[in-house]
Amino acid sequence: AGDVRQDNQVLYYDTVNNRVGFGTNTPGSFAGLSTVRLEFADETGNNSDVLQRVAGGGWGVYAIAASQGTKALPTIIANTGNFGGIDFDGYDGAAYRTGAALLASVDGTASAGSMPGRLVFSTTPQGSVTGIERMRISANGVINFSGTTTMSTSTANSLTVSSTTLTNLFGTNATITNATITNLSANITLTAV
């Protein structure tokens, strides 16, 4: 009892390719998933959830860490580096393709005591396999929609919106002049820039 044993159905480890499979004896073998090191597989989706439980007032953390250098001797991450991401994939009949993704990246100059970051949300449009950035939250708190439009919350209780943002959010005939949105936790003023 308590021993880890390979049975090729519940637990499989591939020492040639350095892969581990739970519920599969071919981890990382599907097109679009060839870089997988750990795979959980299930025929019905009823037994492939991953759970982390924490008690005693603590909380769980799933950390994704990135650096330059090596595992043994890491060096500072590049200013254009990515911390990590989450891809949401579906099988298209030939390969697994990403339909939506979340990417965390360096957003400025990384240095000792400073790690500026941004989050990028992407979705893949109909008829494509290439994701498009839809929203970005930058290190300075600016939120960009569709990669080209900006909503900035840099001033307390105000929201600056470009005319392109209005078109993308509300349609080509949208206009807002000196409008105030009320009934929020704080009043937000929309100002064309």
Image (cartoon, rainbow, N blue to C red):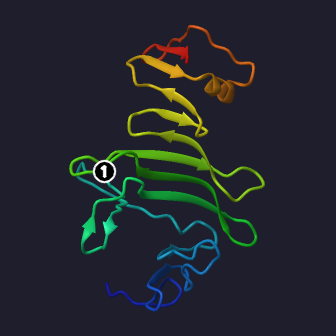
In the rendered image of this protein, does residue 15 appear above or below residue 46? below
Give coordinates of residue 36: x percent, y percent. Answer: 51, 74
Position of 166 compared to 102: left or right?
right
User: Picture quarter containing residue 89?
Assistant: bottom right
Q: Determine the secondary structure under disc 1.
A: loop
Give coordinates of residue 22: x percent, y percent. Answer: 49, 78
Q: Residue at x 36, y 86 (%)?
A: 4
Q: Residue at x 30, y 73 (%)?
A: 71
Q: Residue at x 75, y 19 (%)?
A: 173
Position of 181 compared to 168: left or right?
left
Q: Residue furthest top?
A: 178
Give coordinates of residue 1: x percent, y percent. Answer: 32, 87
**Location of mark 1 (residue):** 110
Residue in the foreground of this view, choosing between 163 and 158: 163
Q: Residue furthest right?
A: 127
Figure disc tally: 1
Amino acid type at mark 1: Ala
Residue in the foreground of this view, choosing between 69 and 97: 69
Q: Residue at x 46, y 81 (%)?
A: 20
